[in-house]
Image (spheres, rainbow, N blue to C red):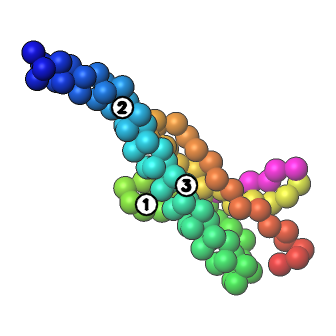
Amino acid sequence: MEVLAALVVWMMIMTLLLPGLVMINQERSSFKHDRTARQLLTKELEKVRESGDVFIGKEIESNGISFRFQKSEENGIPAICAVYLDYRKREERRCVYWDDEAG
């Protein structure tokens, strides 16, 4: 009886903890994709600043995720944005802003 009771308690604990562990793993994956997007954005912005060329959108694949880069403007401030799908297959967008006149 004691073994059966202990088994039931362990199963209840696992039932409560398993969804949380899955969610933590998914969020970690999301943070990893976000960090990769920011790193790639920084590299693209540096290329634009060094060359002085106009940014032309492109697509880069990294860690199994496809990042699409595009130029946009928000409130009159130019930006380079990375668009990608997160672990829930929702479109995420990360942007880096800069001032053309300041260089």
Q: Quadrant of the C terminus?
A: bottom right
SS for callout 3:
helix
Q: Nearer the viewer, mark 1 or mark 3?
A: 3
Give the residue pinned by disc 1.
Answer: 61
The main secondary structure of the magenta stretch is strand
* Residue 37 sits above or below residue 17 on the image: below
Residue occupying image coordinates x 49% and y 48%: 30
Question: In the displayed structure, does residue 60 sit left or right of residue 69?
Answer: left
Given the current orientation, which residue lies at the most extreme front position? 2
In front: mark 2 or mark 1? 2
- Who's the residue at 88% across and 76% down the image? 102
Can you give x and y, in whole percent of width and height, for residue 99 in the image?
A: 85, 68
Between discs 1 and 3, the one toward the N terminus? 3
Name the residue nearer the viewer: 90 or 52: 90
Question: How much space separates mark 2 and mark 3, taking CA atoms?
Answer: 26 Å
Please report whichever mark, 2 or 3, sits nearer to the chain's N-terminal start. Answer: 2
Instruction: Select label 2 or label 3 by which is in front.
Output: 2
Q: Position of residue 32 (x, y in %)?
A: 48, 56
The amino acid pointed to by label 2 is Leu
Give the percent coordinates (x, y) of residue 77: 85, 58
Of label 2 and label 1, which has the lower sequence position? 2
The residue wearing badge 3 is 34
Which amino acid type is shown beneath numbered disc 1?
Glu
Contact, mark 1 vs mark 3 (Cβ under 8 Å): no
Q: Which residue is mark 2?
A: 17
Quadrant hosting residue 13: top left
- Mark 2 near mark 3, Cβ–Cβ under 8 Å? no
What is the spatial separation of the Cα atoms under label 2 and label 1, in whole angstroms?
34 Å
Residue for point 62% across, 48% down: 93
Q: Residue furthest bottom?
A: 50
Q: Quadrant of the N terminus?
A: top left
Residue range highlighted in magenta: 70-75
